[in-house]
Image (spheres, rainbow, N blue to C red):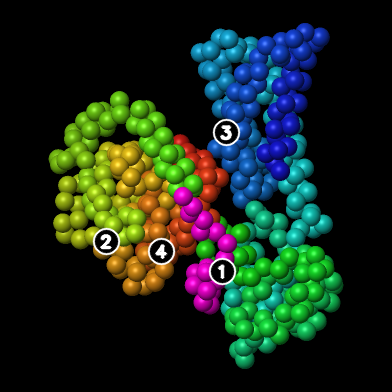
Amino acid sequence: MLITGDLALMALAYYGAYFIRFGDEATLLLAKRPAGEMIFVIILLMNSYLFEVYNLEKHCGSREILVNATIAISVDFVMLTCIFFIFPDLMVGRGLLAILLILFFAVQYAWHVVYILGVKHPFMAENLLILGTGSTARAMGDIIAETTSRFHHRLTGYVECGETSDPPQVPLEMIVGEGGDLQEIVRHTRASAVVVALSEKRGMVSFRNQLLNCKFMGVSIYDSPTFYEEVTGKLMLSYGNIGDELIFSSGFRFGSNLGVMKRVFDIFLALVGLLLVLPFFPLIALLVKLDSPGSIFYSQERVGLMGKMFILYKFRSMRQNAELLTGAVWAQQNDPRLSAIGSFLRKWRIDELPQLFNVLKGEMSFFGPRPERLEFVEKLTAVFPFYPKRHFVKPGITGWAQTRYPYGASMEDAYQKLCYDLYYIKNSSPWLDLLIIFETFKVVIFGRGR
C-alpha cells in the first residue's frame, strides 16, 4: 500500500514539477522524455527500499520517516544527476530535478506519516483472539507482541479451553472467557481472527462447531503453524506432529516447468554475474596472495541436492590451515580465523563469487539453502530430524535464511536457519526469489555479510 501510494505521488511530483517549471510547454516536453520518467521512478523506488523507507519495523515514527526519506532523496539526487550527465538525451536540468525531488520528498513524507498514524489507530487494527491458554497459546501471544510493527495486530485475549490439567501459562488478566462461549466472545471483543493454539490438537474437536460458526460469521481461523509462518516468514517446527501438518499443507510445488524456468534463470544470472566480475578476479587473487601465504581459491566438499557431495569454490578468506588445531567449527561474525583481506571479502560477500561456476555446473542454484559440510549435517541431523529435508532442493549462493538471519554459530542458530530454509522450500516461487535478490542487494550494499 505504501509503494502504491508512492508510485502515484511520483507521477504527481514529476508532472507537477514540469508544470511549475515550464507552464503550458510542459505537456510537449513530457511527451519527449518517457525514458526519463521511467528512470526517475526506478531510482526513487530502489533507494526508498534500500534505505528502509518501506521497513515498518524501522518506520514507526515521524522522526524515523524524516531521516530515512531524507537519506533516500539525497542519494536520488546524486544518482539521477550522474545518470542524466552520462546520457544527455535523457537530460533533466538540475533545477527541474531539484523541484521534482523536493515535491516528492514533501508528499512522500506526508503520505507515510498519515499511513503510520492510520494503521496505528485502534479502528484499523486486526483484533486477534487466541483459543487456548497453554504453552502454544503463550508462544502465539509473544509472536503477536513482537510483530505488531509490521502487522497491526491487537491481541484481545485468550479463551480458556481446559485442554490440559496444567494451570494457564498466559497472563490471567488476558483470559476473556471459556471456549463454550466462543461466538459470544468473538462478538464482544470484535475479533476479526481466531488463532487456534491448543497444546493438544485433538482438543479442537470440542470447539469445531463453534469455530465453524465463527467462520460463517466472516472471522478468519488460523491454526498455529499457519499463523506463525505468515507473520515470521519461517516454519514452526516445534508444534505437535509437524510432519502431518506439512503433508496436508499447501506449497512444495516443484513442477517441471518451474524447475526448467529456475535453471534458465540460474544460468542467465551466473553468466551475467561472471561477465561483470571476471575482470576483477586477477585483482582479488593478487590481494589474497599478498595478504597471507597459501592458495588463492578455497575448495571444500559440501552436501548438495539429495545429499550428493560436490566441491564448492570460494576465494580464500581464512588463514592457511585455519582449522588445523580446532577441527571443523562454524563460521561466525568477526571470525578470528579470517585474514585481513579475508574479513573484507567476507563482509561484502566477494569471497563467494567463484560459486557462480558451481551454478553453471548445475551443482548449486542462485537461490536456496546454504550448502553445509558433511560433519555439520550429521551433527545437526542427530538433533533436528527435519534437517535433511533442506537437501530436496539445490543449495544456493543466497537464500531466504541468509538474508533473514546472521551467521549460524550454534545449534539454536542452525535451528532458526532451518526454519527459514524450510519456509523457502515450502513457498518457493519466482516472486520469493525476486524478493531475495532485493534483500541480498541490500545486504551486499551495506556490508551486512551473513
Q: Residues within 10 Å of mark 4 (few under 14, many from 20)?
A: some
Dot 1 lies on which element? loop
> What residue appears at the point 72 percent right and 26 percent down from the top-left corner?
11
The answer to the question of whether label 1 and label 3 lie on touching residues, with beta carbons closer than 8 A, is no
In the rendering, at what x and y percent does residue 238 appear?
50, 72
- Residue underneath mark 1: 248
Tell me the CA gap for discs 4 and 1: 16 Å
Marks 1, 3: nearer the viewer: 1
Spatial distance from mark 2 to mark 3, Cα to Cα?
Answer: 39 Å
Q: In screen coordinates, is 291 left or right of 211?
A: left
Give residue 66's position: percent from left, percent from top.
66, 37
Mark nearer the N terminus (2 vs 4): 2
| Earlier sequence position, callout 4 versus callout 3 | 3
Q: Is residue 254 magenta?
A: yes
Label 2 CA crowd tier, 10 Å (few <14, some 14–19, many 20+) = some
- Of the two numbered discs 1 and 3 on the same chain, state the one appearing first in sequence: 3
> From which residue to which does the magenta span run?
237-256
Q: Amino acid at mark 3?
A: Met
Q: Is residue 434 left or right of residue 61?
A: left
Residue at the image point whose x is 30% and y is 29% from the top: 278
Q: Which residue was labeled with disc 3?
A: 46
